[in-house]
Amino acid sequence: MKGVVFTGDEIVCKGRKELLEIIEKDLEFFLLELLYGFIITPKEYWDFQKAEEDSKEKSQKLLNMVQERGEATCCWFLEQVERKHPGSIKILLVAVHGLGKELVQETGPSGLKSESPLFAEEGRSSKMENPAVCGESVVCHLCPCEDLPETIRPEVFLDSETSHERYRLCFTKAGSFLCFYTDVIFEVRGAVTITYHFDSWSKHLAEQNMEDWVVAGPLINIEADPAEAVAAVHFPHFLCLAGMAGKSDSQVHIAHFVEGGMSLEKPDRVGPYHVVLENPNFSPRGAILRTSRSWFKRKIKVHTVALLYQMLRFSSPKFHLYLLPNDSSLRKAVHEHEAQCASRRIDKPPWTLRPLTIGCHFFVETNDVRVCPKEVEFQYLDADKLQQYVELSAQQMQDMFNFIVMEKRKNELIWEALVTQEELKFPEMTSSPSSSVQGACCCTLSHAASGHSVESRAMKKTIRDHLVFTLENLREDDLNRFKFKLSELPIAEHFDNIPQGPLEKANAMELSRLLLGFYMEDYAVQVTVDVLNAINCRDEAERLLSLTRKRLE
């Protein structure tokens, strides 16, 4: 039977019974995967959530949606099934036609077949049409899709002279690549090293007359060696150009800052999410929109994301809700600010149901939660500035919080999120199984008595408590990468690496015990931060530093 092949659609069809059983167990997970993978639209997601059907009917409906979207989507979905439940594909193959089959994916109208990335060797990267892993990439239902290249994570390092966080990519061959952190796409002709970082619009525009111009994306400062190896750079923009072909897209330029000031270049192409400059020379560059009349500025529509954070240093639930133009530099600025406030991101679909107009007003509807301010004007603020947010404060824990963002003038739904009690975390309740029960009791009593003693108690937490909290916040794959990197990280003199054996099956509690046993408090925090940075969990590293800084002083 060796050599027999099945397409993804065949496996979905013939293994439907087994697939439905798997989906029904984790229906919400797979529904979110379809949303994050841009297989379904936000509207379809909300309609699905609100449908009055049982889990079995919803599972059948979900699988139908996958099949309707074709072979590539079937293969992609099977990869998500295998990722969630390792070994599922073998079970499905047995159900379909016994053992020994290979999953293949059709690659085009020619009918040629290639191995699915599901069976690729570990570490191999594959080009996926759905940018599910790309930062906070947004697909607007009004705009056409972009064919995005392979997504890669660059090396991240700190420039000692400028204090900028910088990114470095070292390419060895020609190709096109999408940066995970900045949404910039590089087309290269061959071997090249590209170093780049977010720059400041406000710094470069300080002496410019911006009456007829509007910032339309992040400002990126790029260097390349050799420069001629870069064929093109796709700079991200957040403008929604749907229905305005020939009107607004012709007004999109690329601002280019040199010593003499700002010059403007016409891009070679304007796409729904990127503007393309071929054979570029390098300096700070970014997308900018020409607006010759003041009224036109008020009609600019932009792709928008919503970011929700829980503040961890309060005993009662407290949230910050941001509504931002989909600009990677703004998202980074918000993440860094919230990390300093000891907050954590609540993982909800970030994109709004439609693009928003600069200058429109929005408000948040929710039950038994104080909202401040009551109304906010949607606007672009440079990443150097503190981004505006809505503060949501509840007096007590609820089984579920429902946050609904509405546009004021049309009274239209913009974004909605359901947050369950299980999705929330409180540092004072995570140190150990026994203390968590006690902590819950203390929380109830102190809230009733004084309303602030829990916060004081949280400030007295130990370094070990913070280590446990940080490690418990990691995803399973990130925790495994943490343990692998920890065993090989260069360690200071007079210290030893923790052996791989004890690390393999260590959970967060056991891992914190090993860190403190080998390195003591101060150095254990530093080692943890170094490893988190090395595996690109930089938000968790910054949060751990903010939680432990006062404790170590």
Image (tube, grey):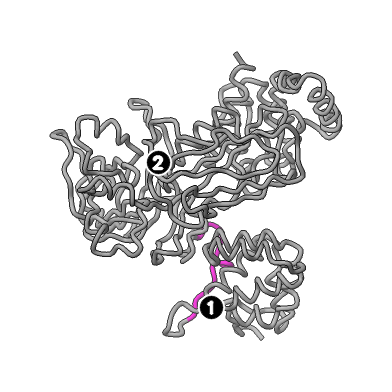
Residue drawn at point x = 54 percent, y = 75 percent = 69
Q: Which of disc 2 and disc 1 is earlier in sequence?
A: 1
For disc 1, the marked residue is 70
The image position of residue 203, as x and y in percent, is 28, 30
In terms of secondary structure, where does tag 2 sit? loop
Locate residue 166: give its quadrant. Answer: top left
Judged by depth in the image, the label closer to the viewer, 1 or 2, is: 2
Left or right: where 279 falls relative to 361: left
Q: In this view of the protein, can residue 120 be seen by the observer?
A: yes
Callout 1 touching callout 2 (CB < 8 Å): no
Left or right: where 387 falls relative to 15: left
Compute the Cα span from label 1 to label 2: 39 Å
For disc 2, the marked residue is 379
In terms of secondary structure, where does tag 1 sit? loop
Q: Quadrant of the N terminus?
A: bottom right
- Amino acid residing under circle 1: Gly
